Amino acid sequence: MGAGRSGKKGVWMAIVFEGLVSTLGPDGTRHLAPMGPRFANGEGDAFFELAPFQGSSTLANLLSHPWGVFHITDQVFFFVKSLLDQPQVDWLPADVIQGWIIGGACRTLEFQVIASDLSAQRSRLTCQVVNRKHLREMGAFNRARHAIIEGAILYSRRHLLNPVDLADQFARLVPLVEKTGGEDEKTAFELLRNVLGLGKNDQAVDRS
Ligand SMILES: Cc1cc2nc3c(=O)[nH]c(=O)nc-3n(C[C@H](O)[C@H](O)[C@H](O)COP(=O)(O)O)c2cc1C
């Protein structure tokens, strides 16, 4: 793999893309989770590194069945729904691995885990791309969609964040969603806000 730790500080020279990983459980159950793998140069790389936390279903599944699908999509609703519960999705069989693709994906990378490092709380799985597919065009940049991704990340780290900071960071996303989001983005944001117990009028904390 081209990516590696560089320099004295051990900083990874790579780019992270946020997407959704589907895996298969030992009983054949399909599982979908948002993940941000690292690519050394870009999406066209033959390898990427996935870093699921120890204890996650994604890691457990990939250790028992080392094949999965990384999905790139503009449908941010999936990021939220797959964090809260497993969403209703149209599943399509993957082309070359035993695995599944979600309807709504723009591009997919079917992969095989070829090496794993479980020495840290965040595992490091080296994944080899075995098939890539273009299903449809990706939608345009939209600030609300990016805000949903940020909101979903905040939700997934809620146990690590001070509640005031969480509410503050979340409140900063509100205008982006309200000004630029469509129906799906607003619904996804509302789901996150409800599950975090944040009111519609919660404001960013003024620290000035
Ligand atoms: C955009 C986004 C990217 C994420 N990337 C990662 C990741 O790279 N590794 C990880 O362990 N969790 C990541 N998470 C959090 C997981 O999706 C979340 O903890 C989820 O519950 C995974 O656990 P599961 O495999 O048990 O479903 C990410 C969440 C979001 C919203």
Image: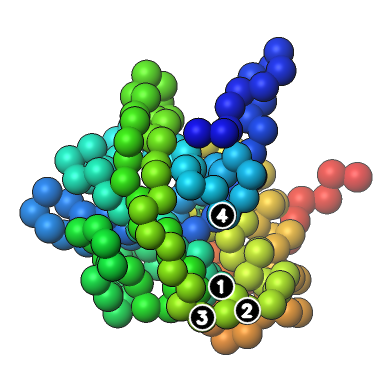
Question: Relative to residue 201, is residue 130 depicted above or below?
Answer: above
Q: Which residue is mark 1?
A: 74
Q: Residue furthest bottom?
A: 183
Give the residue type at disc 4.
Answer: Gly
Q: Which residue is mark 3?
A: 136
Instruction: Residue 175: give x, y in percent of width and height.
Output: 75, 71
Residue drawn at 62 percent across, 56 percent down: 150
Q: Earlier in the sequence, mark 4 or mark 3?
A: 4
Instruction: Residue 180: give x, y in percent of width and height.
Output: 73, 79
Does residue 163 appear anywhere in the picture?
no
Give the residue type at disc 3.
Answer: Arg
Label 2 – label 4 distance at C-alpha: 19 Å
Question: Relative to residue 104, is residue 24 depicted above or below?
Answer: above
Q: Which residue is mark 4?
A: 44
Disc 1 secondary structure class: loop
Q: Which residue is mark 2?
A: 139
Using a 10 Å C-alpha cutoff, classify the residue at mark 3 as few (fewer than 14 neighbours), some (14 to 19) or many (20 or more). Answer: few
Disc 2 secondary structure class: loop
Relative depth, front residue between 27 and 174:
27
Mark nearest the camera among 3 and 1 is 3
Instruction: Residue 22: give x, y in percent of width and height.
Output: 32, 58
Ligand 1: does it lie within 8 Å of the C-beta at label 1? Answer: no
Mark nearest the camera among 1 and 4 is 4
